[in-house]
């Protein structure tokens, strides 16, 4: 009876422990805020070694999240048995969150194995192993790139050159949604408040210059806010790129990507190179008629709609956004 009673007590203690304690879970996630968007993750199973290739997982880097269902408590991380750090607020991440990478992942070269443990009060510790390995990928046959004819921008009686957003010359890149009217919206339902790097989800537009002139360049856009979700990147690949102008002062913008801000709530053709400041874009060089040009638009903010790229001839102070000529032409070219 005594032995049976002892077994009964042990069973009760085990059940109480099971009820009071929960199991932590380790998950590989994208670093920083990126995982809040993509939800890309790989669960780690205790006692198993998971093969993991950082290069193919995400270009944004990675972190390891310790999840403690129903419990909010400080979580301590150990790597290969050595204490690393303690996180006090969710998400509990070994590699840091909100853009701060706090762990030197480069120390773990390919191939190597790393053991990670997370512990918290009232939670069963979770230990898992990661083997950093990148198996060679099978090369797929590459098709020759499609050749697209240049888009010939239509002449307008009012002197505007209009390129519709839907007339891209190299295909629609990921993230952009084509609207019914042919306009393009980047990550239409994504509330993410950060910005993309230059060169992300680029759209290429080719066209012919109709008249010998310098050209003011602006964008017909719709944005939801004055200072957030209101910009894209623009690149003009000819004659030294674009100049930036404001109230008589000029500076060379270069042929690389420049930020184009739309500080209007709604739709307009006023896109400037400095946020809330009327720095207009115009070409550095005189462009001869018949010249084939390329303009590239790159994604920067989410929920931005691009309707058209707008160019119009200008000279001297006419190219600056404060001039009556610029304002008149920008209003016409809708």
Image (spheres, rainbow, N blue to C red):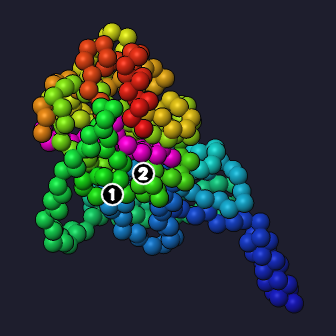
Q: Is residue 328 above or below residue 51?
A: above
Residue that appears at 82% across and 88% down: 4
What is the C-alpha distance between the residues marked 1 and 2?
A: 9 Å
Taking the image as drawn, is residue 253 in sight?
no
Q: Nearer the viewer, residue 199 or 122?
A: 199
What number of labels is visible?
A: 2
Q: Which residue is mark 1?
A: 172
* Magenta span contains residue 63: no
Q: Position of residue 145 (x, y in %)?
A: 16, 61
Mark 1 residue crowding within 10 angstroms, few (<14) / some (14–19) / many (20+): some
Q: Is residue 221 left or right of residue 157?
A: right
Give the mark nearer the N terminus: 1 vs 2: 1
Q: Which residues are magenta?
A: 291-310
* Magenta span contains residue 294: yes
Q: Position of residue 282 (x, y in %)?
A: 28, 25
Q: Position of residue 296 (x, y in %)?
A: 27, 42
Q: Is residue 245 left or right of residue 62?
A: left
Contact, mark 1 vs mark 2 (Cβ under 8 Å): yes
Q: Is residue 39 above or below residue 293?
A: below
Numbered disc 2: secondary structure? strand
């Amino acid at each position: 009876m005594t032995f049976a009673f002892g077994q009964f007590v042990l069973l009760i203690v085990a059940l109480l422990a099971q009820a009071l304690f929960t199991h932590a879970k380790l998950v590989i996630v994208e670093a920083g805020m990126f995982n809040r968007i993509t939800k890309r993750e790989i669960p780690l199973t205790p006692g198993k070694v998971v093969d993991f290739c950082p290069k193919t997982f995400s270009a944004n880097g990675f972190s390891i999240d310790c999840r403690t269902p129903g419990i909010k408590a400080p979580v301590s991380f150990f790597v290969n048995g050595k204490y690393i750090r303690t996180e006090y607020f969710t998400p509990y991440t070994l590699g840091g969150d909100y853009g701060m990478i706090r762990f030197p992942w480069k120390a773990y070269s390919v191939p190597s194995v790393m053991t990670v443990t997370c512990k918290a009060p009232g939670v069963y510790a979770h230990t898992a192993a990661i083997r950093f390995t990148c198996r060679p990928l099978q090369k797929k046959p590459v098709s020759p790139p499609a050749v697209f004819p240049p888009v010939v921008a239509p002449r307008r009686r009012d002197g505007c050159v209009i390129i519709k957003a839907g007339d891209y010359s190299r295909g629609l890149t990921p993230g952009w949604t084509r609207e019914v009217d042919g306009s393009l919206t980047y990550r239409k339902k994504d509330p993410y408040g950060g910005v993309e790097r230059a060169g992300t989800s680029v759209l290429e537009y080719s066209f012919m210059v109709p008249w010998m002139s310098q050209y003011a360049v602006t964008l017909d856009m719709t944005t939801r806010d004055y200072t957030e979700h209101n910009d894209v990147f623009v690149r003009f690949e000819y004659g030294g790129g674009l100049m930036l102008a404001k109230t008589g002062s000029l500076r060379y913008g270069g042929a690389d990507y420049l930020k184009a801000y739309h500080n209007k709530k709604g739709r307009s053709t006023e896109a400037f190179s400095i946020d809330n400041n009327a720095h207009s874009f115009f070409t550095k060089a005189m462009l001869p008629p018949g010249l084939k040009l390329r303009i590239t638009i790159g994604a920067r903010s989410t929920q931005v709609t691009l309707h058209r790229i707008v160019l119009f001839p200008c000279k001297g102070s006419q190219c600056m956004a404060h001039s009556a000529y610029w304002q008149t032409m920008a209003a016409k070219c809708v």
